[in-house]
Image (cartoon, rainbow, N blue to C red):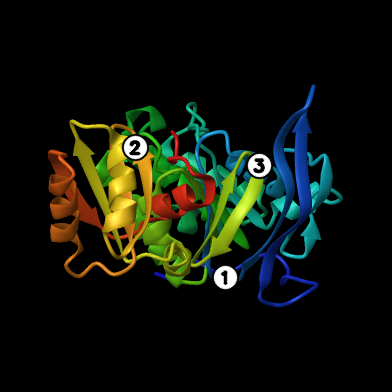
């Protein structure tokens, strides 16, 4: 059953018809002088899944808060569906659906009632709200809990119900703030599937996450942010190409890491860079063919005993390390 575009509020006005979100010089500073977000500029296009990727404390949730009227910017503009969310917050909320990090379901209501009353609040008729609530409950596969308290739901079920509630009124943009944090792998995959289904029907999604694989798997484009600043913005594939390498090799040794790094950088052709990562080294390789034996031989010739060696393709975490020189912290 198609559940989108049946009674969404007025068409998106202003600007490009492809533009659903625009942040213009968006900033948020907390007293005394904490810059949560600094001069953020980005555009989200209609129908895409857009990711804000960064570690905890990077400014992702603050950015989402400013775009959804929950946080007032210190400077700049936030426009959603052509509406300035600061100047017209009440109107903007009609076009916004939000799934926050914490469980905000009404514990005094049943599963069905959480959806039904949400629909009424956003102007749906009683019959429309009843029909849509029933369809969404069926879609998220919690039919047997329809008349039960939301307290009876598992974490994954509750998260799917919050997502269903967020799209009940047909928002122009669905905001998901760390939607899979704390979920088990099965619940996480179920949520991924639901997000993809909604997006396939035309739902624009803005997702904040610190899980690199989540951004890589779900998002059409990703903005990498850290300490409130935008570091890079592109498709996951293009961002990984930006690293300029086709293979990463991680090694550990019982010898001196800095000395081994110098040996490999000097003596192994194809090594682009060597970084110290935790208890080992991460080697960025431009041309991987024959490189593993060359690394082992160079280390052995220099008197180093390699205790572990693994090879992998670049990831979005690799991009983050490339941009910041540090790992994507929790």
Q: What element carries label 3?
A: loop
Q: Which of marks 2 and 1 is in front?
A: 2
Q: Camera-side residue: 39 or 60? A: 39
Q: Mark 1 points at which residue?
A: 6
Q: Label 1: how many residues lie within 10 Å, few (<14), some (14-19) or many (20+)? A: few
- Residue at image x 74%, y 77%? 16
Q: Disc 2 to disc 1, how far (Cα)?
A: 62 Å
Determine the residue located farthest toward the top in the rendered image: 32
Q: Mark 3 points at which residue?
A: 228
Picture coordinates of residue 78 (x, y %)? 76, 53
Q: Name the residue under label 2.
A: 258
Picture coordinates of residue 189 (x, y %)? 29, 51
- Residue at image x 35%, y 38%? 277
* Image quarter hosting the C terminus: top left
Q: On residue 107, which mark appears?
A: none
Mark 3 and mark 1 residues within 8 Å of each other at the beta carbon: no
Q: Disc 2 to disc 3, how far (Cα)?
A: 32 Å
- Residue at image x 66%, y 76%? 18
Q: Label 3: how many residues lie within 10 Å, few (<14), some (14-19) or many (20+)? A: many
Tally of numbered tags: 3
């Amino acid at each position: 059953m198609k559940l989108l575009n049946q009674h969404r509020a007025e068409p998106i006005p202003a600007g490009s018809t492809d533009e659903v979100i625009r942040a213009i010089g968006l900033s948020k500073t907390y007293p005394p002088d904490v810059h949560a977000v600094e001069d953020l500029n980005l555009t989200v296009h209609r129908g895409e899944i857009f990711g804000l990727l960064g570690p905890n404390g990077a400014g992702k949730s603050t950015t989402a808060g400013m775009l959804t009227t929950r946080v007032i910017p210190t400077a700049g503009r936030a426009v959603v569906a052509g509406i300035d969310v600061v100047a017209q917050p009440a109107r903007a909320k009609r076009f916004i659906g939000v799934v926050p990090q914490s469980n905000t379901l009404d514990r005094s209501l049943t599963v069905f009632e959480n959806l039904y009353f949400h629909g009424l609040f956003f102007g749906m008729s009683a019959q429309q709200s009843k029909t849509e609530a029933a369809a969404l409950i069926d879609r998220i596969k919690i039919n047997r809990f329809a008349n039960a308290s939301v307290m009876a739901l598992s974490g994954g079920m509750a998260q799917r119900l919050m997502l269903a509630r967020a799209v009940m009124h047909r928002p122009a943009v669905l905001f998901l703030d760390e939607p899979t944090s704390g979920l088990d792998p099965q619940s996480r995959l179920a949520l991924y599937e639901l997000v993809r289904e909604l997006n396939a029907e035309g739902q624009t999604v803005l997702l904040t996450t610190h899980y690199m694989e989540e951004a890589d798997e779900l998002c059409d484009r990703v903005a990498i942010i850290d300490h409130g600043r935008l570091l890079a913005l592109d498709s996951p594939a293009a961002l990984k190409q930006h690293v300029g390498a086709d293979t990463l090799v991680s090694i550990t040794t019982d010898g001196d890491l800095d000395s081994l790094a110098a040996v490999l950088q000097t003596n192994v052709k194809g090594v682009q860079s060597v970084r110290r990562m935790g208890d080992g080294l991460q080697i960025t390789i431009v041309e991987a063919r024959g490189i593993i034996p060359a690394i082992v031989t160079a280390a052995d010739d220099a008197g180093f005993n390699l205790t572990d060696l693994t090879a992998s393709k670049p990831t979005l975490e690799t991009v983050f390390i490339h941009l910041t020189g540090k790992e994507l912290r929790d």
